[in-house]
Structures are given as C-alpha cells and as structure tokens.
Image: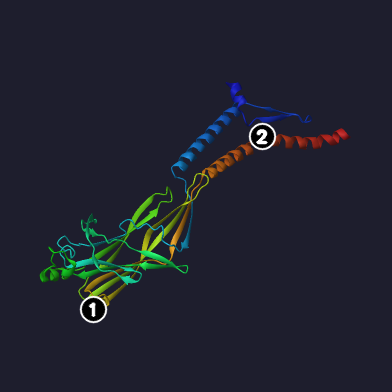
Amino acid sequence: MIKILRAADFFGAPFVQQIDPKQSIYKSAFGGLITLLISSASFAYAIWVLFKWQNNQLSPKISNSVYVSDFSLLDLDYDVIKLYYWKIEENYLDPFESKILLPLVMYTTNFSFSELQVINRSNETSADGTQYYLPKMSLAFQNISGVIYTTSEMYIQIVKCQQIYLKENEKCASDELIEQFFSQPLNTIVLQVQQKQLNSLDGSVQNSLQEFYIQIEKQNCYTLNTFLQSNFYELQNSFLFGYPTYLEYINGAFIQSQTNSAEFCRLAYGNDILGLIYIVMKGNQIKTIFEYPHAGDLISQYWFNCFCSLYDQTCNYHFQPILSQQKDNKKINPILLS
C-alpha cells in the first residue's frame, strides 16, 4: 500500500546533490495520499460543474440594449389583454353581466377602421371570481423605407348598451338598473396586460401582469393610450458551435391617460363611450442576450484551474532546490577556482 501511494505522488521533491547536476525524485506515501485527494476533488468538481451546466444552472453573461424590432417573432398567441369589472363589494352590479355596458373592439387595417365587435366573456375568472373578457390580439407591421410602421391597431370601447350589438334573446338593462349602477361608488374596469419573460438562470418562461384602471362615470370618457413593449431575447446556448435561439415576448406597457367629456368621445367615435383603450406597439424595444457557457468554456476553464494548481505546487517542489543549488554553486565555484 505504501508503495502504491509513493508511486502516485505527483508532488515528489527532487533530491539534488549540490555539485552533481543529475537529479532524482523522492516520493513519499504522504505525497501520494495528497495527490489522490486532490485528483478525487478535481474529478468531483468536474462532475458537479457538468451537472449544473446540463441543468442550465450556470449564470449566463447578460447584456441589454435598446432595439428596433420588426416583430416577426413576437408571440401574440395567448391572451395578452384581459378586461373585467372590479366588484369592490359583493352586491355591486357587474355592468357587463347586467348589459348596462358593453366591451367592443375594432381594428385598423391599412389605416381604415373595421366594424365594431362585441368582446365575448370567457370561462376564465379573476381572483375575485369575476369572468374575463378577452379581445383577440391583432397587430400588424410593415417596413416602409427602413422604418417599421404599425398597420393594424386596436381600439377597445366601453360603451352604453345598445340593442344592435346584442343577440336576439338579449336585452339591455332597465333604466332602474342603470341608475343603480351609476350610483355605486368607484365603478372600475380593469385592464390586464399579460407579460412573459425569460428566467436567466435556466431559460424558462415566466409569466407576470400589469393592471391599469378605468374609472366609469356618466359624464366622462376615460382614455388609456397603451403602448406595449416587447423584449427580444437572443439565447446563445449551443453545445460547442451553433446558431442562437431568438424569442420575443410582450414584457410591459406604457400608459398615457386622459379624461375627456362623454360628448367629446361620442362625436369622435359615434358611440356613447365611457372608456376607450387604444393599443399599439411601442417604437423601440429591449434586446437581451443570454450567453450561456458552452462545453469548450467549461473544459478549458476546468483544465486551466487544475493545471494552475498543479503547476504552482510542482514549481515549488522542483525549482526551489535548483535555485538553492545555483546559489550554493556561486559560493563554491570561487573557492574551487582559488
């Protein structure tokens, strides 16, 4: 056993005579034991690093910049926009369910307006149990002389109920219910913007939301100009060589609000509008690059650390006696010459 440990000693100190330049290495059982411990620790460390790399647990290099996107990769295949009435009290009348107000949506196509459509109620509910109204997202863009223009925008109108927008078996609320609704304090329509972003640790998609509030009053028309912002991601996560992955998600919204008279909105849009939401993409977006370590980085870093450690130890053992010998020779040679 002692012979095996001596044979494994990588840190053997050279045994050099002071006059004879020929060298031999002295190996010990203790040195062999240290060598085996260091080798085992290095191997375990390599396995641990590979495990973290395989499971995307190594932090990437992250860089951010302002970016002008063409939105060709923008993910709109989910419910980006949600609407619901915030029932502050249990006995509050929901204006959408009671057919006091209607949520309508229209789109611009090549700068011309489409017909108004009723936003249908979904089976999905908010935290207080109120059902959401989910407008279909339709935003289109065109590159004109190197400039990205939005050619399809969205307008969501909160209007007083009109029979022309209802089905045959549906009726608008009575005047009594309408008065009861407007006598409620703090009538509020909530606009939710659903967001997605990537977790830098493992590249997984995370969901979040922003909420904006529209106060409903008889005499006013509250307007939210909503500018959606996206984040364009570049994931450099190849094994050794390869192309990066590109993704783009809505990750926020900027709001410009204003309060107009109900008469102003009626003249502008031809409806008894109490709330208006204009939706378009923001001009510039955010670009984020996640540069994950690849196999070449891990191998080079691992062996560089190992060799640095071994090199330092080897230099201490191998070169220190030589330097001592040179110092001694400088002292001996003048004596021999004399």
Say which residue label 2 marks. 317
Q: Would you identify the image quadrant in which residue 322 lies?
A: top right
174 lies above or below 319: below
- Comparing 75 with 313, the one in front is 75
The residue lying at 67 percent from left, 31 percent from top is 13
Check disc 2 and report its element: helix, strand or loop.
helix
How far from the left and from the top, in percent, is residue 89? 18, 62
- Comparing 125 with 215, the one in front is 125
123 lies above or below 325: below
Tally of numbered tags: 2
Classify 10 Å Cα crowding around label 2: few (below 14), some (14-19), many (20 and above). Answer: some
Q: Is residue 43 left or right of residue 99?
A: right
Q: Quadrant of the N terminus?
A: top right
- Comparing 94 with 241, the one in front is 241
From this viewpoint, is residue 161 visible? no
Check disc 1 and report its element: helix, strand or loop.
helix
How far from the left and from the top, in percent, is residue 281? 38, 65
Q: Residue furthest right?
A: 338
Q: Would you identify the image quadrant in which residue 141 lies?
A: bottom left
Q: Is residue 238 left or right of residue 77?
A: right
The amino acid type, in three-letter code, at marker 2 is: Tyr
Q: CA distance from mark 2 to mark 1?
A: 92 Å
Nearer to us: label 2 or label 1: 1
State if disc 1 and disc 2 touch (CB < 8 Å): no
The amino acid type, in three-letter code, at marker 1 is: Glu
Q: Would you identify the image quadrant in which residue 104 lies?
A: bottom left
**Mark drawn on residue 263:** 1
User: Upstream in the sequence, badge 2 or badge 1?
Assistant: 1
The residue lying at 66 percent from left, 37 percent from top is 315
The residue lying at 45 percent from left, 59 percent from top is 287
Q: Quadrant of the C terminus?
A: top right
Classify 10 Å Cα crowding around label 1: few (below 14), some (14-19), many (20 and above). Answer: some
